[in-house]
């Protein structure tokens, strides 16, 4: 058999062939350029061929296509999804080396793994290896896009001034009620706060207030509508997106916004689950 003879995989095992060449009937010779008969057993090619430094050699078989539009090999099968079924292509290294290697010389994409219809319920691959894949980037992990992952990794925050207005924020917050229903400030976070952390701290003020007024006091915060613990008063704050902040003087008394008892500036941080 000359070096121009080619191979194909049948049922996960290499079989001799070329484009348009399937397995021949059992014990018959293979013919190039035509469809061979259907074999009923594996066609095995076994070699003992070591690695070389040359452009060829070192493999049991080699397939190549000199056309600028044709491929090197195509393998097809009709295996179903049963655990006992074999894949259309299997590479099994019985030693410690790599089981496969794909390499592209030029172009923008080295390859693709596609389902006919695609979709979120389809997995491109699975692995039991949990190490870091060097150089591998993903736009979606656990159903989240890269931008969503980056956003969720950040602590959300806002700064509320003495008038109960948002002075600055990371985004998504709106004031529901500031010192109208009572001496508290109610804020909508724009998302479900269940299982999230809420931390409030007083912010310093040194203009229009005395040093004691601008740098002393206390503040607490909590998500609204925690059964048996917190019930928020305003009707529009009775949901899991809302939280309440209670700025107070150092002795626990409420502020009233007067010159003698000014409101407090405060920060709130939301630590997401």
Image (cartoon, grey):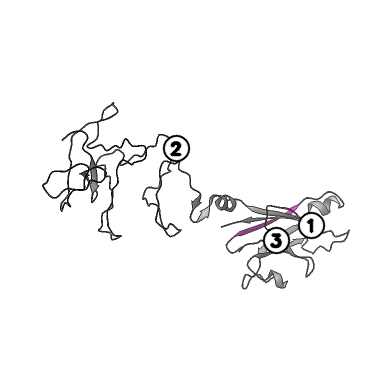
Residue at horizontal 79%, vertical 51%? Answer: 215
Which badge, 3 or 2, comes first in the chain's sequence?
Answer: 2
Residue at x-position 50% and y-position 52%: 140
Mark carried by residue 220: 3
Inter-mark Cα distance, 3 to 2: 58 Å
Q: Report if residue 198 is visible in the image.
A: yes
Q: As drawn, is 190 to the left or to the right of 66? A: right
* Rendered image quadrant of residue 221: bottom right
The answer to whether residue 185 is seen in the rendering is no
In the rendered structure, which segment of residues is drawn in magenta?
Answer: 187-204
CA gap between label 2 and label 1 equals: 61 Å
Say whether residue 84 is magenta.
no
Left or right: residue 112 versus residue 75 is right
Q: Nearer the viewer, residue 188 or 26?
A: 26
- Return the residue at label 1: 264
Q: Would you say 30 lies left or right of 141 here?
A: left
Q: Nearer the viewer, mark 2 or mark 1?
A: 2
Q: Which residue is mark 2?
A: 107
Q: Does 176 appear above or below 41?
A: below
Along the viewing direction, whichever of 133 and 4 lies nearer the viewer: 4
**66 is higher (above) or lower (below) than 158:** above
Compared with 272, 109 (above or below) is above
Name the element at disc 1.
loop
User: Residue 70's x, y, as percent?
Assistant: 34, 41
In x, y percent, where is residue 239? 65, 69
């Amino acid at each position: 058999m000359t070096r121009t003879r080619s191979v194909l995989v049948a049922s996960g095992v290499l079989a001799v062939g070329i484009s348009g060449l399937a397995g021949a009937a059992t014990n018959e010779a293979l013919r190039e350029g035509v469809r061979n008969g259907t074999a009923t057993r594996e066609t095995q090619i076994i070699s003992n061929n070591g690695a070389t430094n040359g452009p060829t050699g070192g493999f049991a078989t080699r397939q190549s296509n000199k056309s600028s539009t044709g491929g090197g090999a195509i393998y097809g099968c009709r295996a179903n999804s049963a655990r006992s079924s074999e894949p259309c292509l299997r590479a099994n290294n019985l030693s410690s080396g790599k089981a496969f290697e794909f390499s592209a010389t030029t172009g923008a994409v080295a390859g693709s793994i596609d389902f006919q219809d695609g979709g979120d319920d389809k997995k491109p691959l699975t692995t039991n290896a949990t190490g870091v894949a060097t150089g591998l980037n993903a736009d979606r992990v656990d159903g989240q896009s890269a931008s969503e992952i980056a956003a969720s990794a950040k602590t959300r925050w806002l700064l509320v001034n003495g008038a109960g207005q948002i002075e600055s924020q990371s985004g998504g917050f709106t004031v529901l009620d500031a010192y109208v229903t009572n001496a508290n400030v109610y804020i909508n976070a724009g998302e479900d706060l269940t299982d999230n952390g809420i931390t409030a701290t007083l912010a310093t003020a040194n203009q229009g207030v005395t040093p004691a007024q601008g740098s002393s006091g206390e503040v607490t915060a909590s998500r609204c509508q925690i059964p048996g613990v917190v019930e928020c008063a305003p009707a529009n704050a009775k949901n899991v997106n809302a939280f309440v902040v209670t700025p107070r003087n150092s002795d626990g008394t409420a502020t009233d916004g007067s010159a003698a008892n000014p409101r407090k500036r405060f920060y709130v941080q939301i630590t997401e689950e």
